[in-house]
Image (cartoon, grey):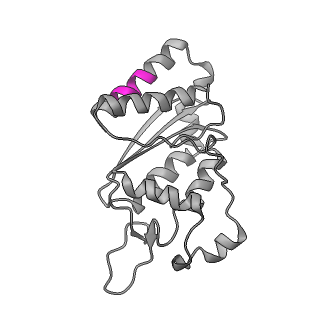
Amino acid sequence: MHAHPCEDSFSAAIADAVVAGARDGGHELRRVSLYKEKYQPSMTAIERRLFLEKEKGHAPEVEGALQNLAWADSVVFVYPTWWFNMPGILKGWFDRTLCVGGAFDFPTPGGPPAAVNGLVPLLTNVKRVAGISTYGAPQHLAFLAGDNGRNTISTAVRPVFDPACTCLWLGLYGMDDSTKQAREAFLARVRKVIAEDF
């Protein structure tokens, strides 16, 4: 999952490294670029009203995203950190896609157990999730600001996956002052980690 509007960005180069690493490791993959697909991140009033009524179905782009998630055993999110958070298009994707009946259910007496967030995960086929992001700020400032994108993926989103789902995080901090060598080394690391460890 890639969330950056510019196809010639360093973020796009990271997404390319993920694809190359997946191929190096013999993995099948589906590359999704939210901007390229013109994904609409805003939840409509109708969607919000129907959010808890899973029998009503989902918008076609939400259904497509849920099908991709149901197919995968691993999910990688690549995005730039802006204002110490993920881009709005990715947050909107989470808001719209991770819905009742698609990504999770509420617990019921005698039903499956809830995850740590109190919800029953439905995407238990996903065993690994990774976040790969660039940060304009150094790591200590991202940490002090809460690193909201990382927390969303590792804490809020991960529990809709397999209960034993692992989380990998790779960040290039201080991107604005990074050298070409540092960026190339980061791309090589991403490719290697995805091929060998993910």
Q: Relative to the observer, which residue lies in front, 107 or 14? A: 14
Would residue 165 be seen by someone viewing this image from the given angle? yes
- The reply to whether the magenta stretch includes residue 189 is yes
Placement of 170 over or under 192, stated as above or below: below
Q: Relative to the observer, which residue lies in front, 154 or 187? A: 187
User: Which span of residues is magenta-colored?
Assistant: 187-193
- The reply to whether the magenta stretch includes residue 29 is no
Quadrant position of residue 145: top right
Placement of 197 over or under 56, stated as above or below: above
| Left or right of residue 181, residue 161 in this image | left
Quadrant position of residue 97: bottom right
Rendering coords of residue 167 (x, y %)? 37, 47
Q: Residue furthest bottom?
A: 109
Q: Relative to the observer, which residue lies in front, 139 or 55? A: 55
Residue sitting at x 44%, y 27%: 17
Quarter of the image that includes the C terminus: top left
Rendering coords of residue 92 (x, y %)? 62, 55
Residue sitting at x 50%, y 43%: 1
Residue sitting at x 47%, y 59%: 66
Residue sitting at x 56%, y 18%: 178
Would residue 156 be seen by someone viewing this image from the given angle? no
Rendering coords of residue 61 (x, y %)? 58, 57
